[in-house]
Image (cartoon, rainbow, N blue to C red):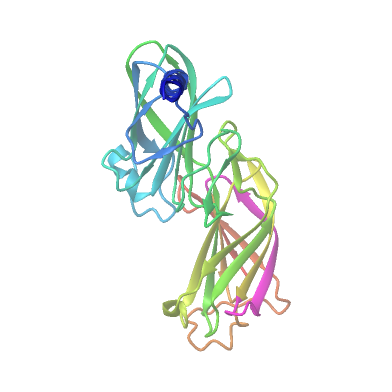
């Protein structure tokens, strides 16, 4: 009995010693959503304010100049803190958060790189590496209207930093002058020449993408002209895409498709194609526009500047 008691006591002492020496397991890759403070590695307070956007929204129906207006443009904001190439912390906010557009950091004295990304995706941005930021929806890469900031801040005292965001994407808009026929369930844009991965340090796309994005066609859209928007990160200040736009039935049978080659893109520019996609312009009795392609089916090109703050290219197909 004494032997058993002694063994039990030794086992208890060993367990206590193990617990006292064991360190807590911390998931260094854990990222927190819906917060307004990030405790990084110090006690110097740095408050970030998303104060302005480089440009107006695409359709120019709101003005963004203060942090309280960020939610009218973007659903999510991600904040990344880096030092010497290493990620220290990444935090996320959604537009319903009370302090959306503001983040307080607690840092030690030193120099840090800050990345802020605002977008309209349904999931948080993946920001472990500021040179390879991705956005996903249902596990697939998807680009939405995206704004960003990248800069270095020197921390030696409490401070507030006003963050101005630049638009990171080029936009592609397809407007069908004919109506969407019954049976169409989705539209797919397949393109090469752009990127779905973003480098915040350069403001450009950084991976050559063969990207396919889908847009659902709802019952309410049948019998109406359609507008379909797509986004990409240009890999250079100016570039081109080769694209194929396809309409599918529910069983993935092709209803109609068109190819568009050497399509010009540029950051903060909308390239808009307007024309007859499903018909030749004569079969659609609901069409209220008099335009149609020429006898050879060639595109006619017209460049217009919508305003000084958002560049818009208009083409007909």
Question: For this rendering, which residue is in front, 291 or 83?
Answer: 83
Quarter holding residue 69? top left
Q: Is residue 119 magenta?
A: no
Q: Quadrant of the C terminus?
A: bottom right
Which residue is outermost to the right?
296
Dominant SS of magenta comes to: strand
Residue 218 x %, y %: 46, 75
Q: Quadrant of the N terminus?
A: top left
Q: Residue at x 60, y 67 (%)?
A: 188
Q: Residue at x 59, y 41 (%)?
A: 198
Magenta-highlighted residues: 248-268
Which residue is outermost to the left?
98
Residue 182 x %, y %: 52, 85
Q: Please give left or right for residue 252 compared with residue 311 in the image.
A: right
Residue 266 x %, y %: 60, 47
Q: Is residue 85 above or below residue 249?
A: above
Residue 63 visible in the shown view: no
Question: For this rendering, which residue is in front, 86 or 6?
Answer: 6
Quarter holding residue 210? bottom right
Question: For this rendering, which residue is in front, 162 or 250?
Answer: 250
Q: Is residue 265 magenta?
A: yes
Question: For this rendering, which residue is in front, 287 or 188?
Answer: 188
Q: How many marks?
A: 0
Residue 217 visible in the shown view: yes
Q: Residue at x 69, y 51 (%)?
A: 193
Quarter holding residue 282? bottom right
Q: Is residue 292 above or below residue 36?
A: below
Residue 42 x %, y %: 39, 16
Q: Is residue 259 above or below residue 232?
A: below
């Amino acid at each position: 009995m004494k032997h058993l008691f002694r063994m039990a006591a030794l086992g208890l002492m060993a367990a206590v010693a193990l617990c006292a020496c064991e360190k807590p397991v911390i998931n260094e890759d854990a990222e927190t959503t819906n917060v307004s403070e990030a405790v990084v590695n110090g006690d110097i307070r740095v408050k970030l304010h998303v104060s302005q956007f480089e440009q107006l929204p695409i359709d120019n129906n709101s003005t963004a100049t203060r942090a309280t207006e960020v939610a009218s443009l973007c659903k999510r904001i991600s904040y990344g803190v880096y030092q010497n190439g290493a990620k220290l912390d990444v935090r996320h906010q959604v537009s319903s958060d009370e302090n959306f557009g503001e983040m307080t950091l607690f840092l030690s004295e030193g120099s840090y790189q800050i990345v802020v990304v605002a977008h309209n995706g349904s999931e948080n941005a993946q920001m472990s590496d500021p040179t390879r930021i991705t956005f996903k929806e249902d596990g697939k890469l998807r680009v939405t209207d995206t704004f960003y900031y990248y800069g270095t801040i020197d921390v030696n005292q409490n401070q507030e930093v006003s963050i101005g965001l630049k638009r990171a994407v080029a936009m592609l808009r397809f407007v069908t002058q004919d109506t969407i026929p019954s049976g169409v369930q989705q539209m797919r844009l397949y393109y090469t020449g752009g990127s779905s991965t973003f480098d915040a340090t350069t403001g450009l796309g950084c991976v050559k993408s063969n990207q396919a994005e889908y847009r659902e066609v709802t019952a309410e859209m049948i019998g109406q002209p359609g507008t379909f928007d797509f986004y990409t990160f240009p890999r250079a200040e100016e570039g081109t895409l080769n694209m194929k736009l396809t309409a599918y039935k529910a069983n993935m049978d092709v209803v109609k498709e068109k190819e568009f080659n050497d399509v010009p893109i540029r950051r903060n520019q909308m390239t808009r194609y307007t024309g007859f996609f499903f018909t030749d312009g004569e079969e659609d009795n609901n069409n209220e526009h008099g335009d149609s392609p020429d006898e050879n089916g060639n595109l006619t090109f017209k460049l217009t500047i919508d305003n000084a703050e958002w560049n818009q290219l208009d083409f007909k197909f």
